[in-house]
Image: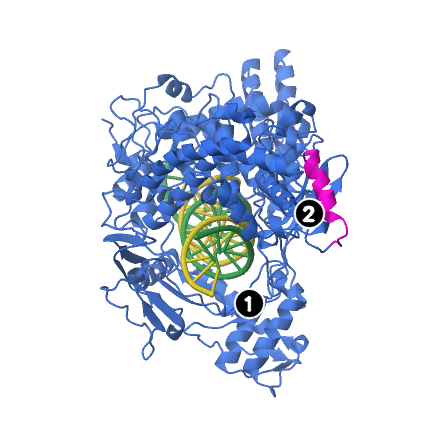
Chain colours: A blue, B yellow, C green
Amino acid sequence: MDEIDDDDEPIVFKRSKTASKQNPLNSATKKSSSQMHDGQSGKQVSEVRSSNGQNSISQKVKPVQSTKASLLKSPSASPKVSSSSVKASPAVSPSASPTKASISSAKASPVKSPVANSKPSTSAADQSKHSSQQNTTSSLKEEKQLINDSEDSEDDKPLISRLSAGLSKQSSNHADRRPNTSSLGLPPVQKPRVKCEDSDDEIPLSSKFQLKPNAGPSTSKSHDFDENKPKAPKLQQNGSTMKDNRIKKSSTVLNKRPVGEVKSSSQSPIKRPKLNDGSSPIVGKQVSVKAEKKVNDEDEDNVPISQRMKNKKSKKVVKKSKYSKSSKMLPGSGEGQKWTTLIHNGVIFPPPYKPHGVKMLYKAQKVDLTPEQEEVATMFAVMLDTDYMNKPKFKENFMNDWRKILGKKHVIQRLEDCDFTPIYEWHQKEKEKKKQMSTEEKKALREEKLKQEEKYMWAIVDGLKEKVGNFRVEPPGLFRGRGEHPKMGKLKRRIQPRDITINIGKDAPIPECPIPGERWKEIRHDNTVTWLAFWNDPINPKEFKYVFLAASSSLKGQSDKEKYEKSRMLKDYIQGIRAAYTKDFASKDITRRQIAVATYLIDKLALRAGNEKDDDEADTVGCCTLKVENVEPMPPNILKFDFLGKDSIRYQNEVEVELPVFKAIQQFRIGKSGSDDLFDKLDTSKLNAHLKELMPGLTAKVFRTYNASTTLDEMLNRETKGGDVTEKVVVYQHANKEVAIICNHQRTVSKSHSTQISRLNEKIEELKGILDALRTDLARAKKGKPPLKGSDGKPKKNLNPEAWERKIAQTTAKIEKMERDKETKEDLKTVALGTSKINYLDPRITVAWCKRHEVPIEKIFNKSLLAKFAWAMDVIPSFRF
DNA sequence: TAGTTTACTTAGGATCCGCGGT
DNA sequence: ACCGCGGATCCTAAGTAAACTA
C-alpha cells in the first residue's frame, strides 16, 4: 500500500487513490499546510497523525480520481500564488510528498487517533496543499467582484447579502461589549492596550448577516419565514452601517495551519489510556447511526395539530426506542446509574503561597504585610492592567475582603492611597523571566508538572481509563465575574481538603489526602452522578464546583450523543409544534399566548430559556426574563431586540415577525414599565413543562441545538459544490459562521486587530505599487522597450510580454488573496466559531460531510474535538441531521 | 438544589516570516 | 540553501463563570 502507510495519513475520508485504502475514517492526519492565509507561502506539510486502523468501518469510498487530479494543481488558469509558494510545492507528486515532517512524525507517534481507521490517503497532504492554491484562484473569481467593491471602503452592501444568501434565518446578534483595559489609576505600565475601537466593532453580529433580507434583492425571499420555519428573516439592522468589510465568503483564513499535529498525539500526556487503546471508545461504536430517514410529514400540514402530534408521537415512539437503544448502552447503566465502578485519585491542590516580599506603598510609604495580606494584595496588583480597574464595584469588593485580612486597625485603610506598582512590576518581571527561559528549561518544568499531575489525570470508569477534566482545585484569586457582576473583586479563598467531597466507587481505594494532616470533607459512593469531587463555591456558598471527566470520556460522549439525538427528534415534531404555537398566538388565555410567543422566539431566534436570577448575579436575561424595554415593536411587524444575554453578551437584532406575534408583544407591554417582565405569566419551568408535553424531553435549549445543527446541515448540503478541499473548508466555515451568528457567539476583538489590519493594508498597497510598475513594463515590452528601473534604481531583466503577464497575474492573485484574508479577518473579529462547534453542531454532520466530500476531518476538528467526538466518527457518509 | 452544559478569556505553545550569517 | 533568531500570529487548551434543567 502506501508507502507511508496509514499512520501518516490524514484522516481524510476520501476515497483513496488506491482502491485498497479504503477509507478509513480516521486516518492520520496531516494537515496540509496549504492554505495559509497569506497565500504566499506554501507551508510545508505538516505532520500526520496516525490512525489505527481499527475501526475503520466505514464505507469505502469510491475512488474519485477526478478530484485528485484536479487537486493537483491547476496552475494554468490561476496564477499561482506567489513564487514563494511555489517552492512549497505544487510540483510535488502526491505520493512522494509526505513531507519529511510527516514522516518523522509518523513514526514518532504511535498513538493513533482514537477514531481512526486508517486510511491512508497518501496524497491528502498534497492535495490539500495544492488545493489551497487552486482554490484560491477559483474562489477568487467568484469573490473577486465582491472584493473589488469592498475594497476598502466599507461596503455598502449589507452583509447579509453577502453572506447568507440563502439562509432565511437570520438572527443576529452582536454585541458590543468590549472590555478592556485601562488601568486603573495605577500605572499602567508597559502594556497599554490598545483598544481598537473601530467603528466596525459596533455592528451587531446579527446585523452582519441579517441584512440580507432586505438588502439586496431581497425581497424575493421574504417569505422566508412563513412556513414553518421560523427563522426570521431579519431585517437589517444596521445599526451601524459601518463598514464592515467582510467578504461574503470567507476566505480561507481559518485554516491556516494544520491541525492535529502528530506531535501532540504522541507526546501529549494526555493521550488515551492504554486501556482503551485499541478499542474504540465505547460509545462510539455501538450504535451506529441509524440512518435516518427523515420523515416528513409535510403533508400533515393540513391535519389538525392534535392529530399531527399524535402521529408524530407514535412515530416518535418508534424512534425513541431506536434512540434509546443507542443512548444507553453503557454497561451497567440502569435507572439513573451512571457507572458501576469508579476509581480515581482525587484532586490536586495548588501550591501554597510563596511570599515575594516586595513592598507596596501606602501614601508613598512602604508597607509590611503578612504573607496572607501580601497574597491578596498581589492578586489585585496582578490585575492592574485589566479593565476591572475601571470598575468601582470590583475595587470596593476587593477592599472589603482585603480589609478583613488586614485587620481593622491596619495602616492601610483606603484603596485610593495604595500603590501596588512595585508588586505589579515584580510580577511583570517574573513573567518576563519565565518567558526568557530556554525551551529546555521550560520543557523540564512541564515534564515535572506532568509527572506530579499524572496520577490525577485519569480515572477508571467501569474498567476503562478515562481522562479527568478539571482535577486541579481552583486556586485562590479575585472573582472575575462577567459583565456588571455584583460580586466581582471578592476574594475567592483557598480551598482545602476539608472543603472537598469525593465521590468514588465503593470498592475503590479512597484517594489519600495530598495535604498532610488534612482530610477530605466526605466520601460518597453515588453512582447516579458523574462527578468525582465537589466543593462549595467560595463566592457563592450555595453553589458548587464539580470535578468531572473530560469531554473525551465516553460518559460525556454518550450524553452528548443523546443531546443530538433529542434534537433530531425535534425534527419530527417541529411542524406540529409550530402549528400549535401559531394557533396560540391568538389564544384567549394569556399564559398560553405568552408561552406561544416565547416558544416562537426561542424557535426562531434561538434565544436561551431565561431563568430567574438573583440580585447577586449579573443582570442578564433570556427569553422568559426579557423585559419590556428589551423588545421594541416597530410597526408594521418588526421587533427590535436589545438585551444582555449569557455572559453579558449583548444581543441586538431587528426581526420581522408574524403579525400576530407582533400584536401579542405589543399587548404584553401594555401597562408595564420598561423594567417589567415582558412575559409576566411565564418562567422557564412553566415553559419547559409545556414543551415537554409536546415532545418527550423537549426543553428550550433543544431548539438552539436543533437550529444550529439544522442550519449547518442545510448549508453544507446546499453550498458545497465542487472545488478542492480548501474551498470546501471555506464553505464549512461559512456555515459555521452563520450558526455562530444565529447563536450570538461573540468574542472580543483582539488587541492587535487594528494593527494587523493596517499592516495588511500596507502590504496590499505595496503590492499594488508593484503591480502598476509591472503593467508599465508590460506596455513597454509590447513596444519593444526595456523595463523601467525599479524604485531602488536597479535595472530589471528584459522579459517578453508573456512573462510580464504572468507576473502581473501572480501579483494580482496575491493581492486578491490578501484582500480576502483581510475581509475574513474583519468579518470574524467579533464572531466566535468554536462555541457552536463544541456545543451545538452535531459532529456527525461534519464527519459525514467530510466523508462525502473527501475532506480530511482534521481540517475541521482539532485534536481535542476529535477526541470529544470519537463517538461520531463512524457515521455513515449519507448521514443527515 | 444538585448536577450538567455552555461560554468566553487567556496563557502559552506552535507557526509563520523576514533577515542576517554561514 | 540552510540555520538560527526574534517578533508577530495563530490556535489550542485550560480555566472557570454562567447558563440550563431534572
| Residue type pointed to by label 1 | Val
Q: Is residue A39 left or right of residue A54?
A: right
Magenta-highlighted residues: A656-674
Chain letter, disc 1 residue: A
- Comparing labels 2 and 1, the label whose residue is closer to the camera: 2
Residue A852 position within the rendered picture, expressed as x and y whole percent measured from the top left: 39, 25
Of pointers 2 and 1, the one earlier in the residue sequence:
1
Q: Which residue is mark 2?
A: A642
Residue A161 position within the rendered picture, expressed as x and y whole percent measured from the top left: 65, 28
Looking at the figure, which quarter contains the C terminus of chain A? top left
Nearer to me, A77 or A161: A161
Label 2: state its secondary structure. Answer: strand
Q: Which residue is mark 1?
A: A382
Q: Is residue A618 magenta?
A: no
Residue drawn where x is 57% and y is 85% of the image: A407
Q: Is residue A795 left or right of residue A563?
A: right
Chain letter, disc 2 residue: A
A14 w.r.t. A403: above or below: above
